[in-house]
Amino acid sequence: MIINTLKQNGRSFYFAHRGAPWVEKENSIISFRRALELGCKGLEMDVQITKDKKLIIYHDMYIEKENQIFYINELTYFQISKTMKDLNENIPPLFSELLPIIKQNKNVIFNIEIKSNKLNNYLIIKKIKEYIHKNNIVNQCIISSFNYMLLLQMKLFFRNILIGFIIGQERLRNNKIIINKIMIKILRPTFINPNGEFISQQFINWIIRNKFLIMAYTINTKTLKNKLKRMGVTIFFTDNHSFYSNKSANEQTTGQSRADNLLFD
């Protein structure tokens, strides 16, 4: 289902990046619901594991408080919640809170980006696998990460899940491309997820020629989107809900002026 949906005969497909962050707080349940209301067919979220083995939806790998750094994987969910409350920030939702939304939206694809800088990722892989199998949502989910070792381990322990290898700006420099190609050949991911501002036409051609699918991030302007489409990219992660919204202009409230400015930059 996922691959056929994303190919779409050359038509663009958009993942709502952390929900609808120009309308609601990113990576929040209300943000995901809002993106779905606006018409997205793909949702992206960041997931990581706490010290007490809870899966939470949160982007940054640490919390900063009073000039101190507290890493998410070294804190319990209770400690994270208390710290966020002290900082007057939203408490990160548990991944389990998102599961009813996934199950209610069978035609929506969910890209779960796992945040981890560890070499051994068995615990978070085990937890993700349990949630996905128990809720019968494997045909709706993609697992992606910057962490190459995590993805290798994911393929070993969770063979029927689709994976995406995220490649950031630094790794897209010309002197790193050969290393990327070797890593990709070993990993054999379904998707390559490059930073859309820095990927070259040459690397795009290589990816397509080797039959991987490209999902570029984070594409918020019409100029960049059209440039990448001309280069052969049709799948995008975006904060800009105007790209996928099925609502009329007057129905899109908070955040719309920002979307308008970037849509016609």
Image (spheres, helix red, strand yellow):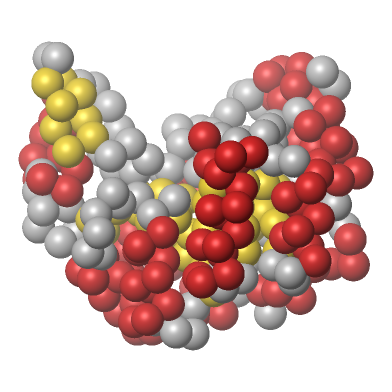
Considering only vertical position in the picture, is 76 above or below 170? below
Placement of 1 over or under 196, stated as above or below: below
Residue 153 is left or right of residue 68, and the answer is: right
Q: Is the N terminus in the top left, top right, bottom left or bottom right quadrant? A: bottom right
**Residue 136 visible in the current orientation:** no
Task: Return the residue nearer the eye: 14 or 21.
Answer: 14
Whether residue 173 is visible to the viewer of this picture, yes or no, is yes
Give the x, y percent position of residue 14. 71, 51
Residue 37 lies, in percent from the top left, at 64, 49
* Residue drawn at 86 percent across, 46 percent down: 231
Q: Residue at x 68, y 19 (%)?
A: 258
43 over 72 or under it: above or below: below
Q: Which of these two is toward me, 152 or 242? A: 152
Q: Nearer the viewer, residue 51 or 164?
A: 164
Please count the marks in the image. 0
Tell me which corner region of the image, top left, top right, bottom left or bottom right, holds residue 72. top left
Assign the C terminus to one quadrant of the image: top right
* Residue at 76% across, 76% down: 4
Where is residue 53? Give x, y as percent. 15, 61
In the displayed structure image, the side of residue 215 where residue 27 appears, left or right: left
Residue 236 place in picture, x, y as percent: 70, 48
The residue that appears at 43% across and 43% down in the rendered structure is 27
- Residue 264, compared with residue 29, is above or below; it is above
Locate residue 248 relative to residue 88 in the image: left or right.
right
